Image: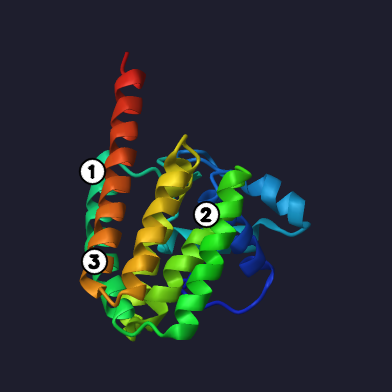
Amino acid sequence: MVKPIARRSSVRDLIYDQIESDIINAVMLPGQEIEIAAIADQWGVSRTPVREALFMLEANGLIEFGLRGQPLVRKLSPKEVDDTYFILATLEGAMAKLGAEKIGISELARMKGLIAECEVLVEANEYASFREATLRFREVVYEQCGNKRLVDLVSSLWIQVRPYGTWLLSQPGMAAARLERDHKILQACEQGDAVLVQKLVYEGVELAGKRIVKHLLEDEASEGL
């Protein structure tokens, strides 16, 4: 995943990576307060590099600061999630079409290998590893699109909604459904049907967004009871 802000390797960067990973993998949940002192103690550093990492995470849309100045994992509203997934469906579909038009024999071989890996992981209920493998599968296509600005833009948007995507893939039947769609994407690439690849990617991202929004609205309704 391309990070919007370039960084040199330092303790601050390592702390950034840890918090980013915890957010993306739903170890830290949307709305959860981030304990600066606890992280500083864990790393054996002052609070300064922790705060610097948090400012970078805020710039990349992963956290926000509350009314008391406390850092919180950013919690998107259902409307924000819906809007973001609509944009992603459009952009990722276009990126998939551009990439599919340039797919070669070596890329197809990589995709087949990743599909085989995904099948094993779904069978073993290894959903975290499956998520990474299915992302690598899609990236084989996207890397061929030849438009770095488009890739960077999509990456920066995905980073903001990845915690929600992680949750969705952990739900019953969702990993299998994703794998079935990836099979169809591979078949369309083999047939040289870039328009079908675009359609499959667009519809998959759009459907994921709708399912997540439905869940968020249900949560809001239950909290209001």
Of marks 2 and 3, the one in the foreground: 3
Residue 69 in view, yes or no: no
- In percent of width and height, residue 101 lies at 29, 82
In the picture shown, does residue 63 fall above or below 97?
Answer: above
95, 161: nearer the viewer: 95
- Number of the label disc, if any, that sits on residue 196: 3
Of pointers 2 and 1, the one earlier in the residue sequence: 1
- In percent of width and height, residue 128 lies at 58, 50
Of pointers 1 and 3, the one earlier in the residue sequence: 1
Mark 3 closeness class: few <14, some 14–19, many ≥20 residues within 10 Å: many
Of pointers 2 and 3, the one earlier in the residue sequence: 2
Rounded to the nearest whole Å, what is the CA distance between mark 2 and mark 3? 23 Å
Which quarter shows the C terminus?
top left
Residue 105 in view, yes or no: yes
Of marks 1 and 3, the one in the foreground: 3
122, 57: nearer the viewer: 122
Tell me: 182 left or right of 85.
right
Of marks 2 and 1, the one in the foreground: 2
At 52% from the left and 75% from the top, the residue drawn is 110
- Number of the label disc, if any, that sits on residue 131: 2
Q: Amino acid at mark 3?
A: Leu
Rounded to the nearest whole Å, what is the CA distance between mark 1 and mark 3? 28 Å
Q: Which residue is mark 1?
A: 79
- In percent of width and height, residue 192 lies at 29, 77
14, 174: nearer the viewer: 174
Q: Amino acid at mark 2?
A: Arg
